[in-house]
Image (cartoon, rainbow, N blue to C red):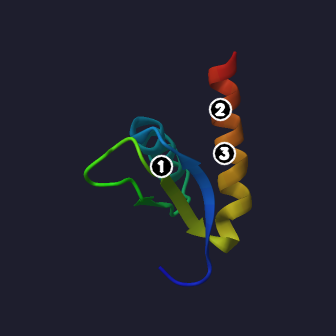
């Protein structure tokens, strides 16, 4: 991962991270997951999603749309 990748989402829920990662990839955003959870104690740490800086605006917009769809 180069220095042009930016953090676009962070969660403690691995299922939520996977759903958002899949949604981003299906919409053409090249996102990756970085699991920073403790390997012994899965309750500590976060899962972070990153994408290239030039795709970050699109990614954040898609994430907001996705979250709004679940709020209804």
Mark 3 vs mark 1: which is more N-terminal? 1
Residue closer to the observer: 42 or 23? 42
Give me the residue at 70% from left, 36% from top.
Answer: 65
Q: Is residue 9 left or right of residue 14?
A: right
Label 3 packing within 10 angstroms: few (<14), some (14-19), many (20+): some
Give the distance between the C-alpha atoms of the residues marked 2 and 3, in whole angstroms: 9 Å
Give me the residue at 57% from left, 50% from top.
Answer: 10
Cβ–Cβ under 8 Å for marks 3 and 1: no
Q: Is residue 25 above or below residue 15?
A: below
Report which residue position mark 2 lands on. Answer: 67
Mark 2 vs mark 3: which is more N-terminal? 3
How far across and how far down the image is residue 32, in percent?
A: 45, 62
Tag on residue 5? Answer: none
Tag on residue 21? Answer: 1
Q: Is residue 39 above or below residue 4?
A: above
Mark 2 vs mark 1: which is more N-terminal? 1
Give the distance between the C-alpha atoms of the residues marked 3 and 1, in whole angstroms: 11 Å
How far across and how far down the image is residue 1, in percent?
A: 47, 79
Report which residue position mark 3 lands on. Answer: 62
Give me the residue at 64% from left, 43% from top.
Answer: 63
How far across and how far down the image is residue 37, in percent?
A: 39, 53
Q: Within the image, what quadrant is residue 4 found in?
A: bottom right
Q: Is residue 55 left or right of residue 46?
A: right
Query: For the residue labelled by badge 1, is the local secondary structure a helix, a strand or a loop?
Result: helix
Query: For the residue labelled by badge 2, is the local secondary structure a helix, a strand or a loop?
Result: helix
Which marked residue is nearer to the observer: mark 2 or mark 3? 2
Q: Is residue 29 left or right of residue 53?
A: left
Query: For the residue labelled by badge 3, is the local secondary structure a helix, a strand or a loop?
Result: helix
């Amino acid at each position: 991962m180069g220095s042009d990748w930016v953090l676009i989402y962070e969660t403690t829920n691995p299922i939520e991270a996977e759903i958002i990662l899949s949604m981003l990839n299906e919409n053409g955003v090249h996102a990756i997951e970085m699991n920073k959870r403790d390997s012994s104690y899965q309750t500590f740490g976060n899962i972070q999603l990153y994408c290239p800086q030039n795709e970050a605006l699109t990614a954040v917009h898609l994430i907001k749309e996705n979250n709004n769809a679940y709020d209804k």
